[in-house]
Amino acid sequence: MYKIFGAKGNIQNVEDFLKNIRKYAKRNKVLIQVFNGELVYGKKHLISAYEHAKRAIKQKTNTTNSLEMEIMLYAAGERQLKTAIPKMGVNKGKNDLAFIFINNSEETQEKKLCQIVDRFIKQFHLVRDDKVLEGDIDTLKKFGLTNKEIQTVTEDKHQDLILEKIAMVDIIK
């Protein structure tokens, strides 16, 4: 079970922010991955990255040693963390953030996962904003797609361009 949501926040120290996320995740028996929301094009983007990462780990074709980092690779459409993290990772200052929280325990039910998310938002002084996840042409360009690539599809298919990049990670591995 997973929960995907968007938020806005001001990150003073990226390392501390990520360290505190890891502590929170461990304490609450969940996995958490955070992304630069400016590069996320809809919930399907992160769902696809999650599904591909799970499959890679199950089939032992994963590149990293954690589900969170494997999701980062797929979400970025990259083969290596050294390019995926600068692309999809969070930055110092004001950020649009996208999160995926993954149930890491059989005992965690959906209601409890929602409570964990709500407490997280308060503890980390974030403002919940799922509009962060919507994506537009600027999102596609920031993601690295060219005008020529974007123009090959109609607007209702823009998200498919991102999903295609995610699927390509399996090929370029």
Image (spheres, rainbow, N blue to C red):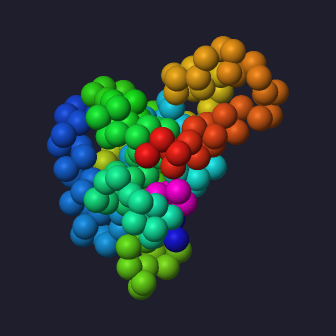
| Residue 68 in magenta stretch | no
On screen, 142 above or below 116?
above
> Residue 76 at x, y = what percent?
46, 38
User: Residue 94 at x, y = what percent?
Assistant: 36, 27
Q: Is residue 153 above or below residue 77?
A: above
Residue 123 in sight in this render: no
Query: What residue is shown at x 70% (from left), y 39% (from top)?
Result: 160
Measuring from the top left, give residue 54's x and y in whole percent: 47, 64
Q: Which residues are magenta?
A: 50-54
Q: Who is closer to the viewer here, 113 or 55?
A: 55
Residue at image position (65%, 27%) is 136
Q: Quadrant of residue 162?
A: top right
**Residue 103 location (% of width, % of height):** 43, 71
Q: Nearer the viewer, residue 43 or 80?
A: 80
| Up/down of 129 relative to 145, above or below | below
What residue sits 22% from the left and 32% below the top? 12
Q: Is residue 51 magenta?
A: yes
In the rendered view, does 21 fall on the left or right side of 84? left
Q: Quadrant of residue 115?
A: bottom left
Indicate left or right for 148 with 12 as reference.
right
